[in-house]
Image (spheres, grey):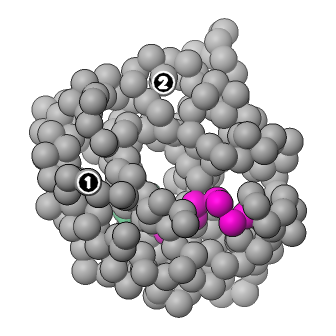
């Protein structure tokens, strides 16, 4: 049985005070004894402040990006070790905004996955097709390419710290959420592809989150699908009550 995971990607939002207040509200509102893993991903500058709030609580902290080298002359970049010192246990890699707005390639994403896992972080690897790709029914080929490229060379132990997030680009920030059936089909396809590549054990224990216009209203339908192991939430994660409603919508 895979644990459900609900993660909030705050993107480039919040002031420091807003970030701390949001983290406090999330910590206070996570139901005692919940089996769902709760994760918040603030912007880099607020990681330490948020990690101070979540320390000793069931809420974990993730970063939204990481560089693929451990140290050196890489102006403006942040290493996995730095993230860990800030209190991060998780990091998002390959978010569609990084792929499509900032030009990250599959090869760069593979390097990031390796370096982050080597340094002990859990990686939330984001994959998903654009609207143009879906309209041409190419989504399965996109998963194949993204999954194959991102996971090349990982060890079995490293797969144990990998989480996937299926985020169809057409659903991100648009209010056009995938239907539970669309999400289930995509997650099932991704899991089958992983099984073909790496075997049933790795594929069966891999958590696959859905992301893209998840709200308190549509979360239960998505989270009750057998291959949907959680949610990666953007806009709705900036309101503690909405985010917490998504956390409590997760079955189990
Ligand atoms: P929205 O929930 O705002 O659509 O964003 C989804 C997302 O990109 C999470 O990483």
User: Is the residue marked 2 within 8 Å of ligand 1, measured from its CB?
Assistant: no
| SS of the residue under disc 1 | loop
Picture quadrant of residue 71: top right
| SS of the residue under disc 2 | helix
Horizontal relation, residue 205 to residue 19: left or right: right
Horizontal relation, residue 246 to residue 74: left or right: left
Horizontal relation, residue 42 to residue 31: left or right: right
Quarter of the render that holds ligand 1: bottom left
Q: Can residue 70 be spotted in the picture?
A: yes
Residue displayed at 73% across by 64% down? 203
Picture quadrant of residue 172: bottom left
Task: Tell me if residue 160 comes above or below residue 75 in the rendering.
Answer: below
Task: Tell me if residue 151 comes above or below residue 44 in the rendering.
Answer: below
* Callout 1–callout 2 Cβ contact below 8 Å: no
Tell me if residue 207 is in the magenta stretch. Answer: yes
**Residue 83, label in figure:** 2
Q: Distance between the residues labelled 1 and 2?
A: 28 Å
Residue displayed at 57% across by 60% down? 207
Residue displayed at 43% across by 30% down? 88
Tag nearer the camera, 1 or 2: 1
Looking at the image, which is closer to me, 134 or 177? 177
Q: Mark 1 points at which residue?
A: 33
Please report the bounds of the magenta region as a residue range: 203-210
| First of labels 1, 2 by sequence position | 1
Q: What residue occupies the far top of the structure in this picture?
A: 72
């Amino acid at each position: 049985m895979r644990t459900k995971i609900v993660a909030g990607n705050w993107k480039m939002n919040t002031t420091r005070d807003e970030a701390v207040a949001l983290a406090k509200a999330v910590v206070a509102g996570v139901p005692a004894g919940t089996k769902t893993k709760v994760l918040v991903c603030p912007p880099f500058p607020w990681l330490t402040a948020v990690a101070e709030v979540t320390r000793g609580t069931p809420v974990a902290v993730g970063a939204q990006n990481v560089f693929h080298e451990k140290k050196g002359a890489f102006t403006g970049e942040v290493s996995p070790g730095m993230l860990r010192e800030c209190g991060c246990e998780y990091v998002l890699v390959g978010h569609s905004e990084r792929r499509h707005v900032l030009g990250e390639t599959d090869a760069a994403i593979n390097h990031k996955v390796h370096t982050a896992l080597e340094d002990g972080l859990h990686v939330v690897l984001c994959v998903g097709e654009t609207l143009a790709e879906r309209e041409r029914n190419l989504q399965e080929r996109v998963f194949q390419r993204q999954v194959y490229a991102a996971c090349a060379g990982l060890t079995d132990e490293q797969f144990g710290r990998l989480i996937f997030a299926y985020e169809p680009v057409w659903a991100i920030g648009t209010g056009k959420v995938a239907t539970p059936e669309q999400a289930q089909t995509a997650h099932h396809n991704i899991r089958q592809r992983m099984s073909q590549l790496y075997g049933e054990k790795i594929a069966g224990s891999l958590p696959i989150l859905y992301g893209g216009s998840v709200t308190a209203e549509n979360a239960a339908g998505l989270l009750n699908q057998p291959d949907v192991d959680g949610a990666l939430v953007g806009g709705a994660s900036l309101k503690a009550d909405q985010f917490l409603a998504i956390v409590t919508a997760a079955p189990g």
